[in-house]
Image (cartoon, rainbow, N blue to C red):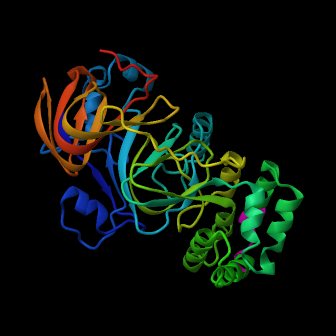
Amino acid sequence: MVLIDGALKNYDWGSPTAIPELLGRRGTGEPVAEVWFGAHWAGSAELRGSGVRLDEHIDADRRAALGATVADRFGSLPFLLKVLAADAPLSLQTHPSTEQARRGYEREESLGIDRDGEHRCFRDRHHKPELICALSEFSALCGFREPTETLELLGTVPTVALDPIRARLTAEPTPNGIGGLLEWLLRQDRQATADLVGSVVAACAARSSLPFAAERQVVGDLGRRYRQDPAVLIALLLNLVTLQPGESIFFGPGNLHCYLRGTGVEVMASSDNVVRAGLTSKHVDVGTLLDIVETDPMTVDVQRPSAVDGVVSYRSPVDEFSLQRIDLNGHARIEPGPAILLCTSGNARLESRAGSHPLGRGAAAWMAASEGPANLAGTATVFRAGVGPGTDSGP
């Protein structure tokens, strides 16, 4: 059991204050979008004070670090824990299934696209399901809305520029119809898109007491940032959800989504595969996106679980990860690893047969499978990321 320091990611959509404040550091004014507490090659955490990367530490004795079952099945730590802090929208994106990731990775390898290159979508062979748990109020676009509801929304945006979208949704309000509309929007030339976005932004700004005010506000804000981007119009088709602290959403493969604003704890399969649809200066691969995006309308499943003995468990249908929030007021038993603990408020002490460490706000610790259970004492909120309940780490 050791304390670890996360790898910072300074993407331009990040907050200059949220993550530095969590970590107890002075902000530099530079945006800090994410801090990674995991063993992914693109941003491994480090063992505090040693300069040793967590992935190197695990590789030195995988069976001791991960347990026999996890080591044999996955070969490396299968999850990645992050804190994400968005001051501006992220790219509109989706992630592949395992089979799609394998095929995409092999295709891009055969084409000689550099793994770190800007035109790379598949940087590894793994799927990337993910779960976000809000630390602050957190807003996102998530999956396609029922077409009948989208038509109601479009009815509150007074511009004939949306007539082609209305007509397509009315004629074929099915996943195939949504897929065709998505492709039509993504294939528009820049000038036609700019004209359409401009008309929609102006219409969304019109004063109105009609429903969908929050959705129109989001689309208007996106349109002012990305005037020639069809993803602004795609946002009209997606569910808008706002999480309160402690609430979460799970995102499966193909779910088209965009984080808009807020700070959250995110856990995912240890992958960096992203296929973007827009709202970004990064590479957009329309063909690949259309191959993997899920166009079935969905109702967003916001998780609001209750604590049991001070522990909140979030639902995840995958074996790579699980997430719990421990609302500590006294003592709690922490199950054996492989696991990463992250304190987001208060102060605690973590003790096991491997040693004892203070765990204050912003501190994180790695627990190997070989160490057995630990004890956590104090008053704090601590997140525990581990493997899924269907994966027994074994001795």
Highlighted magenta segment, given as a residue range:
183-191
Quadrant including the C terminus: top left
> For residue 75, which quarter of the picture?
top left
Q: Is residue 70 left or right of residue 359?
A: right
**Where does the image place residue 204, in percent across and percent down from the top left?**
65, 79
Residue, x 57% and y 46% (percent of image)? Answer: 95
Is 151 contained in the magenta span? no
Q: Residue at x 71, y 64 (%)?
A: 186
Magenta segment's dominant SS is helix
Q: In the displayed structure, would residue 117 be above or below residue 57?
A: below
Q: Is residue 309 left or right of residue 184?
A: left
Residue 41 seen in render: no
In percent of width and height, residue 235 lies at 64, 65
For the question of whether residue 329 can be seen, the reply is yes
**Nearest the eye: 370 or 73:** 370
- Which residue is drawn at the image coordinates 30% and 20% (left, top)? 63
Side (left or right) of 291 relative to 337? right
329, 315: nearer the viewer: 329
Q: Is residue 268 above or below residue 280?
A: above
- The residue most toward the right is 171
> Residue at point 81% right, 50% down?
174
Q: Which x, y percent locates residue 173?
A: 82, 54
Residue furthest to the top: 395
